[in-house]
Image (tube, helix red, strand yellow):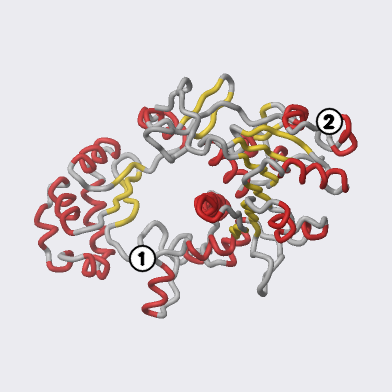
Amino acid sequence: MWNESTDSKGALAGLRVIDASRVLGGPFCGQILADHGADVIKVEPPAGDETRTWGPPFAGDAASYFIGVNRNKRGVSIDMSQPAGQELLMRLLETADVLIENFKIGTLERWGLGSETLQARYPRLVHCRISGFGADGPYGGLPGYDAAVQAMTGIMSVNGEEGGDPLRVGVPVIDLVTGLNAVIGILLAVNERNESGRGQFVESTLYDAGVSLLHPQLPNFYLNGKVPARSGNKHPNITPYDAFQTRTTQLFLAVGNNRQFSTLCRVLGRPELAAEARFATNALRNEHKKELRAELEDLLRQHDCAAIARELIGAGVPCGPVRTLDEVVDDPHTHHRGMIVDMGDYRGTGSPVRLSRTPAVYKRRPPAFAQHTDEVLREQGLDPEHYASVLPRSPGA
């Protein structure tokens, strides 16, 4: 369980990050760094991060979509379309270790702030750019959104019911993995900087993330040349690895080896099933998956889902009830693991990365629009009034 009163400053204490990204991948990256102690300053355009409007539900000026990935940050707004705003960004970078941005490819260059310029002016800066496809190549510079890239990278082609149409994965998995890849790249660059004293350019793209997620489908294709088809909840390589109906609700079985399969059959009262020739190995179970499914579902329909799940997992068979989100939030283990964070009227999802001495620390709820503009500028020795023309005070100002 997370401890609000922890003395830890976080593993990244002392790292200053300018998060000039919007929507999901970049902000998710920034929140991970902020949860682990980095001083993350979120820079929004005059209209605000568009996810502030991606609701309902709303809390104040922000939709839940924005709230979910902008915790622990300080918020400023700068109109960087004006030279004075670009100058102000440069001033903020003077004390920054990391810049995260997902401007349209070519925007920074048009402002005279391309990566080479930034590296020359700030040799220790780690500049992380998040984009749809990167700057070059056949798709270079094109805009990318999660669902469209799921389609382009083949993720939709392997997601959906057997014989059905391709389906988008229900969570923006590419955006989130792109954010995680950005965190990895930033930390690699910061670590290398400890040796070289020099920052570098880090790139994380939606397209690369999408392709990287296709496991085991791509390795299978490399080996057998067969284009994989949709298989519903079934695993392409493992059986039984699927959702099965019990007397109450569905149970997902994830049986990865012969020992687990033997235990499953014993707990369900049919130990002899594991000894049948057609089910003796995973390869044979894959060949006879329809017959095996019928056998298992007949047995499972005699049981309550929650009760048989507890018995099976207690015996060493990986499985779990197919649950709804309210059940997940109500689960005591979710709270025990610190995955629900409450600060006053704020509720968020905790960091899944646990460090023993320097755990994640939750100190700030997501910022209101431009909430910390004056505070951040004055820390830099800058007069907010001097930059008043490029400091919006409310969305659309």
- Which of the 4 image quadrants contains residue 129? bottom right
Q: Is residue 89 left or right of residue 267?
A: right
Local crowd at mark 2 within 10 Å, few (<14), some, or many (≥20)?
A: some
Q: Are marks 1 and 2 in contact (CB under 8 Å)?
A: no
Amino acid under disc 2: Pro
Q: Is residue 355 left or right of residue 69?
A: left
Q: Is residue 3 above or below residue 305?
A: above
Local crowd at mark 1 within 10 Å, few (<14), some, or many (≥20)?
A: some
Amino acid under disc 1: Pro
Q: Is residue 14 above or below residue 97?
A: above
Residue 4 is situated, as x and y percent measured from the top left of the image, at: 48, 22
The answer to which of 94 and 22 lies nearer the viewer is 94
The answer to which of 395 and 308 lies nearer the viewer is 395
- Which of the 4 image quadrants contains residue 372? top right
Mark 2 sits on what residue? 384
Mark 1 sits on what residue? 236
The answer to which of 217 and 48 lies nearer the viewer is 48
- Kindly tell me whether residue 5 is visible in this rendering: yes
Residue 210 is situated, as x and y percent measured from the top left of the image, at: 53, 62
Q: Residue at coordinates 66% horizontally, 60% vertically from top-left?
A: 144
Q: Is residue 109 above or below residue 179?
A: below
Q: CA gap, disc 1 to disc 2?
A: 58 Å
Q: Which mark is residue 375?
A: none
Q: Is residue 30 left or right of residue 110?
A: left
The answer to which of 166 and 339 lies nearer the viewer is 339
Q: Residue at coordinates 76% horizontally, 28% vertically from top-left?
A: 378
Helix, strand or loop status at disc 1: loop
Point out the frontmost of discs 1 and 2.
Answer: 2
Name which of mark 1 and mark 2 comes first in the sequence: 1
- Kindly tell me whether residue 170 is visible in this rendering: no
How many numbered badges does the structure rendering display?
A: 2
- Which of the 4 image quadrants contains residue 246? top left
